[in-house]
Amino acid sequence: MIPQDDTATHPRPDFARIEPAPRFLPHCAEPRIVAMGLSSMEGCWIDADPSHSWRAHKLKMRERYGDRVYQVLEESTQAATEFASLVALETGNEVSKTDYEALWEASLNVADDLVVMLPDEQGVYRLMAASLCSPSDWRLEEKLGLTMAQVHGPIPRLNGEIGGQIDRFFARLPSDRAVQRFNWSVTPHPHFLSRDHWDVSDESSELWYRAERQSLRRLPQSGAIAFTIRVHLCSLKALAPIEGALESLWSAIDDAPRDLQKYKGLDVLAPVIARWRAKNQL
């Protein structure tokens, strides 16, 4: 389904969180939309943001959406609490909760969204808990409790090309190793949370570059996979001074298979991209 956004329910964000330059350019290293792209962690596996702007964003999102941005299934409470304790150890902020709210309390001290994936009795990993306040065009209430294959079902080619790799990776990830991967996308809005439908006008020529750094590590006690998602967002114009950044982006978009272009909304954005390039002479 083409990702879109209902502007009536997504007010313009605090621009303190919009970055003046891209922190990461994952499309330059891995232009494919469907790829594992795993590497060893560089730097801290979570981002303890001292500005409190992410805390304010998360509190606002939970007030507005409730359990659509935070849920912990009962059988994952122990794993979620273990994850919260790990975040607290990293940030130095004590988590007072030991129940359903523990992961939420921990998430307020980091910029990242926090997700727990726990194996079921057959060893199949399922999405069982999350503090998810900045998702890119997916809904927690539609994914909670699903297997990884089901979670990734709407993404063309993914299960067929790398679904088996994902399952094997989850089964083999040791508790003493953390890895990272990146996603990239182009959007017509600067919203961190995107759940509904883009509303792209015929005159629109504004574009934004969104990069997600994701980390994965195994929780030693529960055996769950702790998954973090840190969103970085900047104006597409910020890529212009970086040699090869825009050229690589246009190539990645042009080379993407048609079904993946449609999934990412790049077909809808094609006229916007054309107007943006003409306006900026790029």
Image: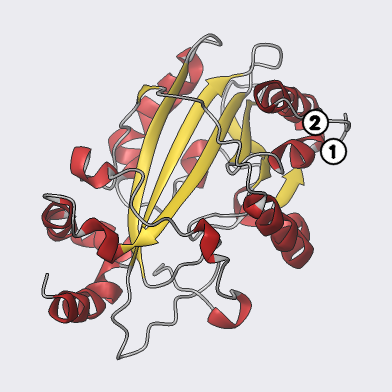
At x 79%, y 40%, the residue is 105
At x 38%, y 33%, the residue is 181
Q: Which mark is residue 166?
A: none
Q: Earlier in the sequence, mark 1 or mark 2?
A: 2
Q: Is residue 41 left or right of residue 92?
A: left
Q: Nearer the viewer, residue 21 or 12?
A: 21
Q: Quadrant of residue 86?
A: top right
Q: Which mark is residue 100?
A: 1
User: Can residue 119 be seen at all in this image of the molecule?
Assistant: yes
- Residue 63: x %, y % from top left: 78, 63
Inspect the image, locate mark 2, and give the three-letter code of the amino acid beneath it.
Thr
- The residue that mark 2 highlights is 77
Q: Is residue 149 left or right of residue 242?
A: right
Residue at far bottom of view: 202
Inspect the image, locate mark 1, and give the three-letter code of the amino acid beneath it.
Tyr
Q: Which quadrant would the N terminus be assigned to in this image?
A: bottom left
Q: Quadrant of residue 131?
A: top right
Relative to 71, residue 222 above or below: above
- Residue 5: x %, y % from top left: 49, 74
Circles 1 and 2: CB distance less than 8 Å?
yes
Residue at disc 1, secondary structure: loop
Q: Which quadrant would the C terminus be assigned to in this image?
A: bottom left
Q: Is residue 190 left or right of residue 245?
A: right
Q: How is the image coloured?
A: secondary structure
At x 76%, y 42%, the residue is 104
User: Can residue 192 be seen at all in this image of the molecule?
Assistant: no
Residue at disc 2, secondary structure: helix
- Residue 240: x %, y % from top left: 19, 60
> How many marks overall?
2
Q: Nearer the viewer, residue 53 or 175?
A: 53
At x 37%, y 72%, the residue is 188
Alpha carbon distance from label 1 to label 2: 6 Å
